[in-house]
Image (cartoon, rainbow, N blue to C red):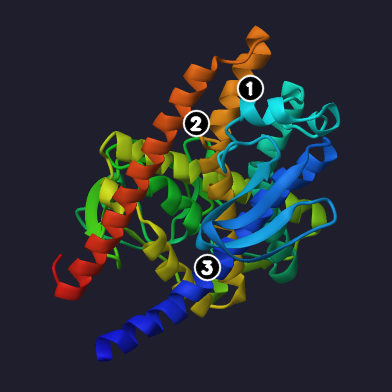
Amino acid sequence: MDQLASMAGWIWHYGIVFLLVLTFVVFIHELGHFLVARWCGVTVKAFSIGFGPEIFGFSDKHGTRWRFAWIPLGGYVKFVDDENAASKPSPEALERMSATEREGSFHAKPVSQRAAVVAAGPIANFLLAIVLYAGLNMAVGIRVMPAFVDSVVSDMPAAKAGFLAGDKILKIGDTGIESFEDLQKIVSVSAGQQLTFVVERNGEQVLLTATPAVEEKRDTFGRTFRRGLIGIQRSISPDKVQTHAVGPLEAVGRGVTETYGNIKATLMGMGDMLSRRQSAEQMGGPLMMAEVTGKVAEMGLEPLFRWIAFISANIGFLNLLPIPVLDGGHLLFYAYEGLFRKPLSERIQLAGFQVGLALLMMLMAFVFYNDISSIVRRTLGVG
């Protein structure tokens, strides 16, 4: 009974918040497809949040069915000549159409318009992230804790390189360091790689080199991850925290930079897993995302909005991966069509959709396995 109550509490505390966040981000993504499709004269048959049987919905005056479905892990916009939710073309549907109906066909539109409709979803996600970051930057300002060294851990790379308490790190290589967070982002993904630091010490600039050591740890979800460490502690003195008010232009510029930073971090993480510098078991699925979302929501609205921006930027990026069934796969097909002035054969497109779907199913199975393994480890106190 206690376990059932605990599970119900988890679902309410974490699951509901996550579904609200995911639904909002997915809605913005699909709205991007929808608006550009309408602008291009495409007839939209359905706008769905979730997959599977419909829970409830309504039809608008243009004949589009707006629906909520039982499997809330995504969504789709279905055009009048689509065979399925992955926007696979249906030659049979095209043949049955009258000349008037064909005017609203997605697959009969010029390749430039089809590409614009497909790209609009990820672009909408990027714009959402930028708007959220820009709004937060204007509302609360930019809080920065410069990279001051409070103490140096003995026998670690920083100590061997000659770092001293009181140093202020200005650059790593050619990259300027505004905050301790900037320092952590670079060092954590640079284990085993020699880095050059420009340090301010007693009003002068000093050049130091250090190679971050590798630390392997388990996070709060029981997943193994590796990070680089040089062995310095930051100053947490309140007088070191700086808050800067920013105007609209700077706020938007920083929003673009933060959105790009999210995508870059995801790319580096994927590269680390492919090169085995990081363990693939740290890839989380919906359960981990739900738990993180719930914990971030407990911290307040600002962290939650930043987390929504992070999710939105990454959903936009992941949808651009060149995998058939994803937006990036469609854009790859359209790039071929635009370059060679003819579409790929139906046989190749069908094979692409089947391979893409298989890859997605395997990825979903893998991240669900990671989620369940994490829960089992924490429940049994293993690892």
Q: Seen in the image, is 256 located left or right of residue 152?
A: right
Q: Earlier in the sequence, mark 1 or mark 3?
A: 3
x 38%, y 61%: residue: 165
Instruction: Locate the C terminus by quadrant.
Output: bottom left
Foreground residue among 245 and 315? 315
**Residue 143 sits in which quadrant?**
bottom right
Q: Is residue 264 visible?
A: yes
x 68%, y 34%: residue: 81
Q: Position of residue 14 (x, y in %)?
A: 44, 75
Foreground residue among 344 and 235? 344
Q: Is residue 237 visible?
A: no
**Tag 2: amino acid:** Pro
Q: Earlier in the sequence, mark 2 or mark 3?
A: 3
Q: In the rendered image of this protein, does residue 175 appear above or below residue 148?
A: above
Foreground residue among 165 and 378? 378
Whole-angstrom CA distance, mark 2 to mark 3, is 26 Å
Task: In the rendered structure, find residue 324 and report the number of the disc placed on it.
Answer: 2
**Tag 1: amino acid:** Tyr
Label 2 sits on a secondary structure element that is loop
Residue hosting label 3:
19
Q: Position of residue 32 (x, y in %)?
A: 72, 47
Task: In the rendered structure, find residue 89 and report the number of the disc placed on it.
Answer: none
Foreground residue among 214 and 239? 214
Q: In the rendered image of this protein, does residue 145 appear above or below residue 192?
A: below
Whole-angstrom CA distance, mark 2 to mark 1, is 11 Å
Q: Position of residue 276 (x, y in %)?
A: 25, 38
Q: Position of residue 311 (x, y in %)?
A: 54, 56
Task: In the rendered structure, find residue 334 and report the number of the disc placed on it.
Answer: 1
Q: Seen in the image, is 40 located left or right of residue 336?
A: right
Task: Report how many numbered discs are placed on residues in the image.
Answer: 3
Label 3 sits on a secondary structure element that is helix
